């Protein structure tokens, strides 16, 4: 399978290493708007060629799949461009910045019989895998889930690997991670009695940096009601990202791939493939086998519905016409 990597930032590095470790996968094309950066990444990671745009790369139609690792606002358009050109897509989260774009991507994938997988990489962590297994096996019945994603991120981002700054979204990016985590633990569901509170706009971004979400979930796995609280912040000087799950049988904390209770660690990653390797191997296998990948568009729709409902609250509260 021949891969086109769109982007040369931190996640492009991770995906390049993961994909290079898989049998019969060729790192074919890498894209950066500046040719010198594309060429530098090509030489460092073993790609056959560099290009300055996805459209230019598609003119030389010699690869099979596209991996989208660009800033959030580009994901949907680049995914749709690749699908229309007949390419399978592995896309970093968020797949899109609206429910409507997400639905359209799903339609295009089905229309062209192509695989689309979204990088909800946390689903491949050992601790989360064990937590999901316990719920699915009926050994653990969640009653409450409190999920947090907190960091300090108040403006343009420019990482060591990134040559172009970009602006993040606490709701659509880290909320996407966190709400999907709840969906993964409880099973995909529609939020009941959803309550969304979004903080004031940060002056340079015209978007909130703090969000809280609450809803009632009926787990399709257990059939039980569970209360959900999600706290998101780009104002936190002390970063946190975890899922505190109170259940009938135990109280569990899933924290960066480790699952523990009050007695200690229950599960953590052992030696072997890391979570990006496991995820990317699933994408490659799904393409080769002609089946839906583990985290396809259908799998992310419940999360995108909640994020869209929360964003609609923000738009309404700030007098923005949602039809534009």
Image (cartoon, rainbow, N blue to C red):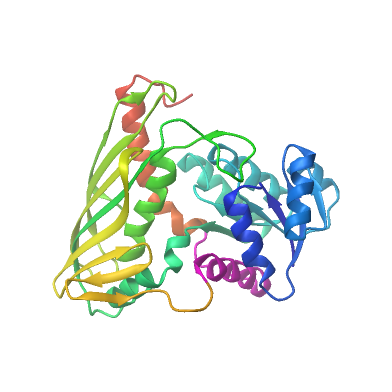
Percent x, y of residue 258: 34, 69
Residue 112 forms part of the magenta stretch:
no
Residue 64 x/y as whole percent: 75, 61
| Residue at x-position 41% and y-position 21% | 321
97 vs 280: above or below: above
Residue 55 higher or lower than 302, as above or below: above
Q: Is residue 97 above or below residue 88?
A: above
Does the rendering let one see residue 29? no
Residue nearer the viewer, 165 or 209: 165
Q: Is residue 187 left or right of residue 36?
A: left
Percent position of residue 223, x then y: 22, 68
Magenta residue check for 276: yes
The quadrant of the picture occupied by the N terminus is bottom right
Could you say which quadrant of the image residue 113 lies in?
A: bottom right
Residue 247 located left or right of residue 283? left
- Point out the stretch of residues depicted in magenta: 274-296
Rendering quarter of residue 109: bottom right
- Find residue 289 and report its image quarter: bottom right
Residue 279 rendering spot, x and y as whole percentages:
54, 67
């Amino acid at each position: 399978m021949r891969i086109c990597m769109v982007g040369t930032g931190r996640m492009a590095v991770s995906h390049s290493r993961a994909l290079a470790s898989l049998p019969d996968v060729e790192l074919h094309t890498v894209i950066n708007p500046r040719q010198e950066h594309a060429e530098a990444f090509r030489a460092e990671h073993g790609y056959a060629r560099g290009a300055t745009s996805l459209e230019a790369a598609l003119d030389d139609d010699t690869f099979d799949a596209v991996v989208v690792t660009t800033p959030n606002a580009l994901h949907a358009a680049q995914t749709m461009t690749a699908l229309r050109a007949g390419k399978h897509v592995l896309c970093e989260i968020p797949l899109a910045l609206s429910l409507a774009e997400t639905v359209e991507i799903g339609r295009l994938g089905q229309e062209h019989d192509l695989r689309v997988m979204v990088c909800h990489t946390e689903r491949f962590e050992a601790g989360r895998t064990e937590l999901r297994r316990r719920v699915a096996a009926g050994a653990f019945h969640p009653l409450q889930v409190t999920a947090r994603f907190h960091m300090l991120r108040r403006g343009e981002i420019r990482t060591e690997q990134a040559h172009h700054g970009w602006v993040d979204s606490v709701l659509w990016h880290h909320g996407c991670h966190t709400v999907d985590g709840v969906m993964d633990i409880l099973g995909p569901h529609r939020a009941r009695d959803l309550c969304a509170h979004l903080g004031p706009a940060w002056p340079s971004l015209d978007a909130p940096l703090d969000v809280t979400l609450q809803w009632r979930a009926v787990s399709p796995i257990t059939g039980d009601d569970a209360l959900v609280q999600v706290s998101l912040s780009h104002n936190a000087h002390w970063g946190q990202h975890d899922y505190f799950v109170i259940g009938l049988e135990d109280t569990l904390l899933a924290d960066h791939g480790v699952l523990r209770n009050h007695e200690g660690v229950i599960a953590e990653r052992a030696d072997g493939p890391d979570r990006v390797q496991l995820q990317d191997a699933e994408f490659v296998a799904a393409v080769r086998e002609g089946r839906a990948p583990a985290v396809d568009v259908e799998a992310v729709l419940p999360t995108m519905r909640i994020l869209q409902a929360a964003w609609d609250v923000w738009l309404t509260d700030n007098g923005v016409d949602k039809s534009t």
